Amino acid sequence: MNAPLNPKKLIKGGLHDWEVVIGMEIHAQVTSRSKLFSGASTAFGGEPNAHVSLVDAAMPGMLPVINAECVAQAVRTGLGLKAKINLRSVFDRKNYFYPDLPQGYQISQYKDPIVGEGEVLVDLPEGESITVGIERLHLEQDAGKSLHDQAPNQSFVDLNRSGVALMEIVSRPDLRSSEEAKAYVTKLRTILRYLGTCDGDMEKGNLRADVNVSVRRPGEPLGTRCEIKNVNSIRFIGQAIETEARRQIAIIEDGGTIVQETRLFDPGKGETRSMRSKEEAHDYRYFPDPDLLPLEFDQAFVDGLAAGLPELPDAKKARFVADFGLSPYDAGVLVAERASADFYEAVAKGRDGKAAANWVINELFGRLNKEGLSIDESPVSADQLGAIIDLIGEGTISGKIAKDLFEIVWTEGGDPRAVVEARGMKQVTDTGAIEAAVDQIIAQNPDKVAQAKEKPTLLGWFVGQTMKATGGKANPAAVNALLKAKLGIE
Amino acid sequence: MSVDAQTVRRIAHLARIAVSEEEVAPLQGELNAILAFVEQLGAVDVSGVEPMTSVTPMAMKKREDVVTDGERAADVVANAPETEDNYFLVPKVIE
């Protein structure tokens, strides 16, 4: 399924070429109102310890009760990853001590996760695509948050995030470059956002990655890996992989060996460094949580959720290619965000799909990016953009004028049709008026007229002059035809 | 299966239980006695027997996704030795 080894993806060391092998564990916060095992709110922010129940604070005698919606969200995500849904799964305790983990253990799933093997199709920038295997997805609790900069000798602990549901999505080591890793996370994020199971907000820490990196000479067995913890942006994921792969290559080429360990990426210094304290904590002494029965549901529950899933990006992309005649690249750009795809579909409805795609991608997205706006904040609505495209299609305005019109609608708003009327932007199709302009230009430039008979490319100059004389409103086709006839070209 | 003195020290540390040097040997003996007892259970043939997860056969209870708790920060930190603005204060823990 995966493309053969691409030499361009190898990293050049001092002595050899090296292949980097990457697997990822993504922690995605489940979209839900309340926590995984308590009725406290999951809302971001909030006063210290305000969104905390006595369950989240691990007071003695408190018992966890699972949130049914978090279970449904995990199943939906599993379906979106074309994964095996396990009708029976088990919650285990993962034991370690840290001040932001009041229970002394995290409730997680170890041997029997809710979701088993699946796959994600990832499109790469060069048009190639790879299939990344998903090993498992399990539900677990998030920990609280420690603030270390509030006092010289103390840390401040806030448990608002303690107990919020996370999905840990573990990939197979199927990624072979930082580019592939970034594309994988981007695609996974898109799928989660389509499903509505995680908002994918990396700035808030709602999606974060642990990245496993190893290097090997092509064809050799897997090397020893290091895990880079908690990388919180797609750009940093790429940088962390490049940095870590080069660190490992330098060690091996110097005759050293890689020690399996947990490391932290420091984007400021552009280095990864060892988190020695995490090493012994790897002995988590998992055992089934005696407070929780196995999580069981039937196939009908899964089927019901499957029936309610939205159209996912791969299917939408294929449909845009088939129904609107778009290139896979353009379709990919449009489906990256559900809101963009919906906007495009509203514009394309009943219109030329390609023209609509050009306007949405080139003009609208270009302008939105420039202003740092999201599609939801677009000052130009799908109806307005559709009207502009209609005006071009009808021959009422030229493509060039349409760009001016887009600018006016962007800054001032209004019905594009009314704007065209009010500002006299209509294309001149009246041949009489165009002919008058053409005649004048021919009369004023006898030398160029003579040259044009020898050199037909001069036609362009005449077209330009005519458009200028008519304020860009002359119908370009009419101008061309008239000029050709009068100059005797062809 | 049995544990050595080093393992006793390690699991005590993982559980954050202070064990003095003179306690290690007696604890090692006690732990090994428990392990030996558990090993006797290994003689029972349990092939084909489902692990029991509950005394009464029942499905796990589930909650609706509604906010029913929280907004009681003062209660949450009430027993903490030190607090500020409803934060727990702990000795500095940073890598």
Image (spheres, rainbow, N blue to C red):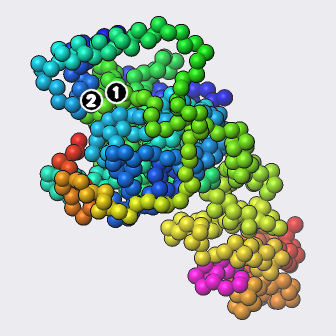
Residue farthest along the bottom direction in this orientation: A422
Q: Amino acid at mark 2?
A: Leu
Give the quarter of the image for residue B71.
Answer: bottom left
Q: Nearer the observer, disc 2 or disc 1?
A: 2
Q: Residue at x 77, y 51 (%)?
A: A319
Q: Position of residue A441 (x, y in %)?
A: 75, 84
Q: Amino acid at mark 1?
A: Asp
Q: Nearer the viewer, residue A478 or A102?
A: A102
Q: Chain of mark 1?
A: A
Does residue A138 belong to the magenta stretch? Answer: no
- Left or right: where does residue A264 sit relative to residue A189? left
Q: Position of residue A399 (x, y in %)?
A: 73, 73
Q: Residue at x 76, y 65 (%)?
A: A348
Question: Which residue, given by chain and number where applicable, does mark 2 sit on?
Answer: B14
> Disc 2 and disc 1: Cα gap in Å?
8 Å
Give the quarter of the image for residue A281.
Answer: top left
The crowd level at tag 1 (other Cα within 10 Å; few <14, some 14-19, many 20+) is few
